Amino acid sequence: MALSTGSKIIKTAVFISGTGSNLKSLIKFSKLKKSPISINLIISNNPKSKGLEYANIFKIKKKVFSLKKITDEKKILFELKKDKIDLICLAGFMKILSKTFIKSFKGKILNIHPSLLPKFKGLNTHERAINKKEKYSGCTVHFVNSKLDSGKIILQKRVKIKKDDTPKTLAKKILSQEHKLYPKAILKVFSL
Ligand code: GAR
């Protein structure tokens, strides 16, 4: 699993759509001595993403592409090449990337998903886990392939679902685990 990178820092782009709390945790992680990554670019499909504020706070380059046009992916690829990005971390990115895009970054895109994959791919994971009376849910970091939420799993963290949990309380519990799991998964994949 570990991809050796020598001593080279891995230039990373984080893709977001919303709040960006995973982005924030990845930025904090990237600043640690043990981190193999630097975060050089933030991409959002949503100009109103709260997470874009972290670009200003931490002085990281940001770009917004709606991804409503097919040419937007080409523009993103251009930006990634220009900044010599070698890793993409999807962090609450709610758009599906095309097969062509994924192919051109093969094996170098990670995603975090709020369920214990392969259970509950897609949206509304917490609501579905509660409705199915699951005892546990959690989060998964995985490689991205051309099938939704189906790439090779890197790490997972289980979270207990309590009787009185609502989708909201469960989301909160899982999100705080996500913040720890994503950095751990990066450390697992990239050994310095
Ligand atoms: C996180 O729970 C993440 O796992 C999920 O969106 C949330 C984003 O929170 N991602 C997906 O559902 C992707 N299918 P954040 O913007 O605070 O990091």
Image (cartoon, rainbow, N blue to C red):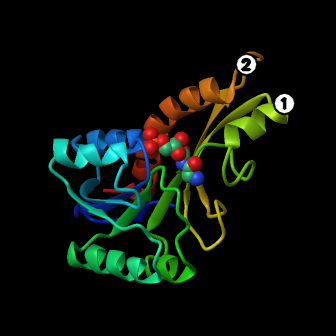
Which residue shows up at 26% across the image and 55% down it? 39
- Of the residues shown, which amino acid type is indicated by label 2? Lys
Q: In terms of sequence position, does the residue under pointer 2 or pointer 1 come before the other?
A: 1
x then y, percent, for residue 35? 28, 47
Question: From what the image shows, is residue 35 above or below residue 103?
Answer: above
The reply to whether the residue tagged 2 has its Cβ within 8 angstroms of ligand 1 is: no
Quarter of the view holding residue 124: top right
x then y, percent, for residue 42? 30, 57
Residue closest to the far top? 164
Residue 34 visible within the image: no
Residue 133: assigned label = 1
Residue 161 visible within the image: yes
Q: Please give left or right for residue 23 compared with residue 139 in the image.
A: left
In the picture, the quarter occupied by the C terminus is bottom left
Q: Secondary structure at mark 1?
A: loop
Residue closest to the far right? 132
10 Å crowding of disc 2: few (<14), some (14-19), many (20+): some
Q: How many marks?
A: 2
- Of the residues shown, which amino acid type is indicated by label 1? Lys
Q: Please give left or right for residue 142 compared with residue 120 in the image.
A: left
Which residue occupies the foreground of this view, 127 or 178?
Answer: 127
Which residue position is annotated with label 2?
Answer: 162
x then y, percent, for residue 78? 29, 81
Question: From what the image shows, is residue 58 above or below residue 66?
Answer: above
Quarter of the view holding residue 136: top right
Which residue shows up at 40% across the image and 49% down it? 187
x then y, percent, for residue 114? 60, 43
How far separated are the C-alphas under marks 2 and 1? Answer: 10 Å
Which residue shows up at 70% across the image and 54% down it? 121
